[in-house]
Image (cartoon, grey):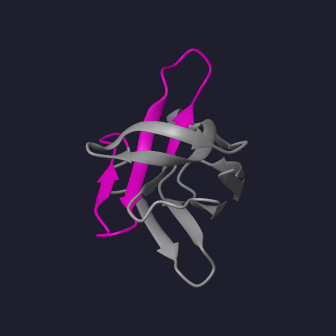
Amino acid sequence: QVQFVESGGGLVHSGGSLTLSCVVSGITLDNYAIGWFRQAPGKRREGVSCISSSDGRTYYAGSVEGRVIIFRDDVKDTWYLQINGLKPEDTAVYYCAQAALEPLCADFASWGQGSQVTVSS
């Protein structure tokens, strides 16, 4: 079973930064993508950022372009999402997930429990 363990969320003032971490286990595919989507009450799920495990291709949603960096630690098998310049509209539960490769970040197959990010004004 594929498992995702997210951490790093919390309450942050507007303009602050957070780095979310995701430990992934159980993926047997050679080529796959890991990403983050977020979900806020009353809003559609939004793919935030994804990265391909094989070629390093990345995807960033327009809403976070320039404020987000997705990266990985090969040694620790941990995937990260750094969010800078947080805005109140970034408030959501952030989920680490296995993502589609083509189009990158177009869909998600499985994910973890999520981590709440709350940005105060």
From the viewer's perspective, tell me whether residue 27 is left or right of residue 29. right
Q: Position of residue 60 (x, y in %)?
A: 33, 50
Q: In the current view of this chain or complex, which residue is farthest to the bottom?
A: 75
Q: Is residue 75 above or below residue 48?
A: below
Q: Is residue 112 above or below residue 4?
A: above
Q: Residue at 44% across / 32% down in the picture? A: 46
Q: Position of residue 97 (x, y in %)?
A: 55, 47
Question: Which quadrant would residue 76 be assigned to in this image?
Answer: bottom right
Q: Is residue 105 magenta?
A: no
Task: Specify the segment rendered in magenta.
Answer: 36-63
Q: Residue at 57% across / 30% down in the picture? A: 39
Q: Position of residue 119 (x, y in %)?
A: 63, 42
From the viewer's perspective, tell me whether residue 88 is left or right of residue 85. right
From the viewer's perspective, tell me whether residue 29 is left or right of residue 113. left
Q: Residue at 52% across / 60% down in the picture? A: 81
From the viewer's perspective, tell me whether residue 36 is left or right of residue 5. left
Q: Is residue 88 visible?
A: no
Q: Position of residue 56 (x, y in %)?
A: 32, 69
Question: Which quadrant would residue 42 be assigned to in this image?
Answer: top right
